Structure formats: C-alpha cells, structure tokens
Amino acid sequence: MVKSRQSDVSRLVVAAFSRHQLALDWAQEQLSHIYGPIERVSPDYDFDHTAYYASTMGLGLKKRLIVFAELIAFEALPEIKNRTMGLEFELAASRRFAELRPLNLDPGMLQLGKFLLATTKDQAHRIYLRHGVYAEVTLRFQANEFHVWPWTYADYREPAVRTFLTEARQALHNTIQLRRRQRC
C-alpha cells in the first residue's frame, strides 16, 4: 500500500497591479491582515507588457509582488484566489477610483521546484483545482534559477522578476531547512 504524502510546502505570493499607488498600498495592507506577516515585497515595476487591462484599469499600471512569511498548503489556493477577487470587488465598489477595475490581485504559490499562479481561465496547460480556479506552473526552478515555459506571462520572463522570486525561493528553502533542524 502506498502511503499518501502532504503537498509541497508553499509560500503565498500575490501579484498586485494598479495605476494607483493608494490601491496597491490598500491591497498590501488588506492582504497582510488576512494572510499575516509579509516576508518581502518587490519594487514596483511598470506593467506595460500587455494592453489587455487598459479598457478596465487604464494605462500606466504598476505591479508589485508580495511574498508572505507563513508557510501555507497548496490546497488553499482556490480559496485564496476567490478571496483576492473579493478584495478587488470591494475596492471597485468603494468608487474611490474612476476605473471599473482599479486593482488586480493574482495569487500564486512559491515552492522549491516551481512558481504557480491561480486563474479562473482554462487553457490546455492549466489544471482545474476547485471553486472555478485553475493552477498554472508559470516558472520552473532548475540549475539554481527559475526558467520560463512557452506560456509564461511576459513580465514573469523579466530577469528582475525571476531574480526576486529566486531570492524568495532561497528564503523559503532556508525556512524549510531551519524547521527540519528544529524537529530533530
């Protein structure tokens, strides 16, 4: 009989983008209240890799990656995706900003071997989880760095983004090693 094992240890990463600094800061604050302490935050960078969001979010989008300190089960990803969509709707409903969608939040999971993103859109390379949410392996970790797939979004192909995630992955590795030593 084969013994089942737990899923890979993960760290929550939320990609937040908006053209409003206040919206990004609001999102970071709300997310930290829900998901706990933040381990690191990327510098904001221009999210000009696509025009897909221009009609609902406007131009001049900035994006930041927020990495949370707590280890989390991969199985939580669908609930997290739906919770972050709820935050997007909450901010839009407040009418603090003119855009229909002043904020986009894309949660993902950082693991030692990969970086995954949650999405509500099906494609051939995505796996359905539950509650209308799919998972996509966006980057794979090999030979001490993250590598792209043909479907990897343009901004995740950027060296600075992959370096940031590699550094966050090293911190995750260190946390796992420390916990293993503490159990012995």
Image (cartoon, rainbow, N blue to C red):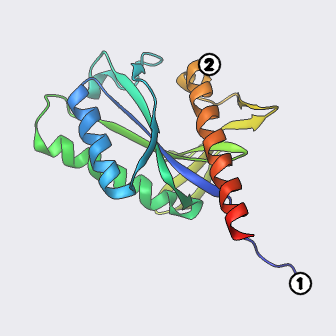
Say if 77 sits above or below 58 in the image. below
Q: Could you tell me which residue is drawn at 54 percent across and 60 percent down?
A: 72
- Residue 30, how many percent across, how many down? 27, 49
- Residue 4, how many percent across, how many down? 77, 75
Say if 160 sits above or below 168 in the image. above
Callout 2 touching callout 1 (CB < 8 Å): no
Q: Which mark is residue 114?
A: none
Say if 160 sits above or below 92 in the image. above
- Residue 128, how many percent across, how many down? 59, 57
* Numbered disc 2: secondary structure: helix
> Label 2: how many residues lie within 10 Å, few (<14), some (14-19) or many (20+)?
few
* Front-lying residue, 79 or 124: 79
Instruction: Give amino acid for label 2.
Output: Pro
Instruction: Give amino acid for label 1.
Output: Met
78 left or right of 139 in image = left
Residue 124 appears anywhere in the view: no
Q: Nearer the viewer, mark 2 or mark 1?
A: 2
Quarter of the figure with residue 102: top left
* Front-lying residue, 1 or 150: 1
Q: Residue beneath label 1, please?
A: 1
User: Mark 2 vs mark 1: which is more N-terminal?
Assistant: 1
Quadrant of the drawing holding the N terminus: bottom right
Q: Which mark is residue 159?
A: 2
* Front-lying residue, 9 or 3: 9
* Numbered disc 1: secondary structure: loop
Q: Could you tell me which residue is drawn at 38 percent across and 55 percent down?
A: 36
Q: Kindly give the residue lying farthest to the left in the view shown.
A: 95
Say if 148 sits above or below 131 in the image. above
Residue 60 appears anywhere in the view: yes
